[in-house]
Amino acid sequence: MLRLDSVSYTYPQAATPAVADVNLAVRPGQLVLCTGRSGCGKSTLVRLLNGLAPQYYHGFLTGRALIDGHDTRERSLTEISALVGTLFQNPETQFFALTVEDEAAVSLECRGVESSVCVTAVRNALKELGLENLAAQSVLKLSEGQKQKVGLASILSQEPRALVLDEPAANLDPEATVELACRLRALKESGMAILVVDHRLYWLEGVADRVLVMKKGEICAMGNYALLEDEGLRAACGLRDCHVEDVRRLLPENRPTHKGENGSGERGLRVEELSFAYKGQADLFHQVSFSLRPGVTALIGENGAGKT
């Protein structure tokens, strides 16, 4: 479904190729993970597979980028986007509407899809990603993780045959990340071809069928997920750990402190009985008290919990 045959690509005014002699294939029912340190060519790979390179970014391409057997240079971006859904690293850049429901529907409406079909597709996509209660919410008031979910819902509502995802779990909380992994597993089992470009690796263990490691614009290693167990490879290519333990259960209990204290008798910041609500909405938090000691404090919580 997605294929690159000996592809090299150079951006306009660039002296060297962003990717060089890349070969890869993603079949229907397969999920391929592409990883590597920043600047290795991963984002260019995304642009090659959705036609943006060279159709939008121009530049010089040798070899062939194929979607369902057809060269991307022989199809319009409109035709390509009907087959391949792309979720960019910053989903805000692909929003066109102001509410969650409208954003999930806008591409279908632009294609002239019948209203009743559009409504059903949007409702199903929002439900699959747990967004049905946010349908009327402004996309401007969503957390970053919720925005990623909305971007994915907008893509899934179109029922593409392939997905290209650029760091789709970057802003998701741990539970939402697990849910996304399960969703991607179900999509590939339904026959969809999926390419995930990511620095985070652990969440695709047991989901990714194949792993590609990039370095300086080239694929330097390829294999199954066990490939990432190689500490030498991870060190040489700047890769993160392939297994990550959820340490939240090891965190000390948050004990209330007496008024005027920060928990240790040291100087710091104290917040007492803080309540806050956005205009026209219920309290996001109510009479919250906490203290910040000198040093680094981590604030964690699910998407939409109120961290921002």
Image (spheres, rainbow, N blue to C red):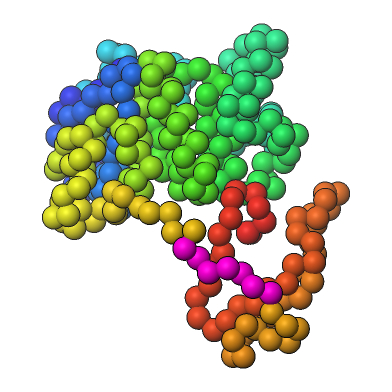
Q: Quadrant of the N terminus?
A: top left
Point out residue 96 in the picture as x, y percentages from the top left corner: 62, 34
Considering depth in this image, is 304 or 55 the residue closer to the camera?
A: 304
Point out residue 254 in the picture as x, y percentages from the top left corner: 61, 69
Q: Quadrant of residue 34?
A: top left
Q: Quadrant of the C terminus?
A: bottom right
Is there any visible trace of residue 290 in the rendered image?
A: yes
The secondary structure that most of the magenta stretch takes on is loop
Residue 242 falls left or right of residue 305: left
Residue 6 falls left or right of residue 190: left
Considering depth in this image, is 195 or 11 the residue closer to the camera?
A: 195
Point out residue 263 in the picture as x, y percentages from the top left corner: 62, 83
**Does the segment drawn in magenta span residue 255?**
yes
**Does the segment drawn in magenta span residue 62?**
no
The magenta span reads 250-256
Q: Quadrant of residue 158?
A: top right
Q: Residue at x 62, y 17 (%)?
A: 121
Point out residue 88 in the picture as x, y percentages from the top left corner: 46, 39
